Amino acid sequence: MLVVADGEAETICQKALELFDRGAAGLYEPEDADRGYIEVEDRRGRMMRYPILTLSIGVGLNAADLTDYREIVDAATELKAFAKRQAGSVYAIDRRASDAH
């Protein structure tokens, strides 16, 4: 969990994804990184494809109508699950928050 000032979440998420993707690409052979997956043989001799590492971030906002920090954590967890269903490294911000944001 990371707590940031109001209005900074999107910029921080963008930078985190940029840095993560740059670092993750360096863990793979260039052709694997360009292809987006690696192929390895499993214990049974089958060739398997595994996607390259990605980062998914969910952001919960501290809206005025939230009375407990766990509500923010719940929102962030829900948004992270949504982000994980998207391709590549992505973030999702809870835009359902009150009009205060």
Image: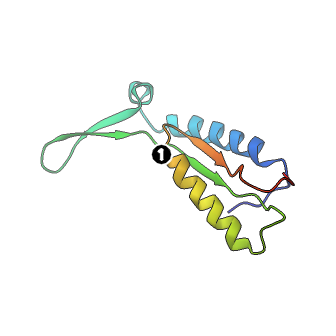
Residue at figure coordinates x 66%, y 66% from the top left: 73
Specify the farthest residue to the bottom. 68
Q: Quadrant of residue 21?
A: top right
Q: Is residue 17 left or right of residue 46?
A: right
Q: For the residue carrying disc 1, how many other residues have a C-alpha within 10 Å: few (<14), some (14-19), or many (20+)?
A: few
In the image shown, does 54 or 87 lie closer to the viewer? Answer: 87
Specify the farthest residue to the left. 44
Q: Is residue 37 left or right of residue 45?
A: right
In the image shown, does 30 or 80 lie closer to the viewer? Answer: 80
Residue at figure coordinates x 13%, y 44% from the top left: 45
According to the image, what is the colour scheme of the structure?
rainbow
Specify the farthest residue to the front. 99
Q: Is residue 31 left or right of residue 46?
A: right
Residue at figure coordinates x 43%, y 35% from the top left: 28
Circle count:
1
Residue at figure coordinates x 62%, y 45% from the top left: 91
In the image shown, does 27 or 6 lie closer to the viewer? Answer: 6
Q: Is residue 83 left or right of residue 101?
A: left
Q: Is residue 49 above or below residue 66?
A: above
The residue pinned by badge 1 equals 85
Find numbered disc 1 in the image and state the secondary structure of the residue it sits on. Answer: loop
Q: Is residue 71 above or below residue 77?
A: below
> Which amino acid type is marked by label 1?
Arg
In the image shown, does 49 or 69 lie closer to the viewer? Answer: 69
The quarter of the rendered structure image containing the N terminus is bottom right
Q: Is residue 59 above or below residue 49?
A: below
- Can you give x and y, in whole percent of width and height, for residue 6 in the image? 85, 53
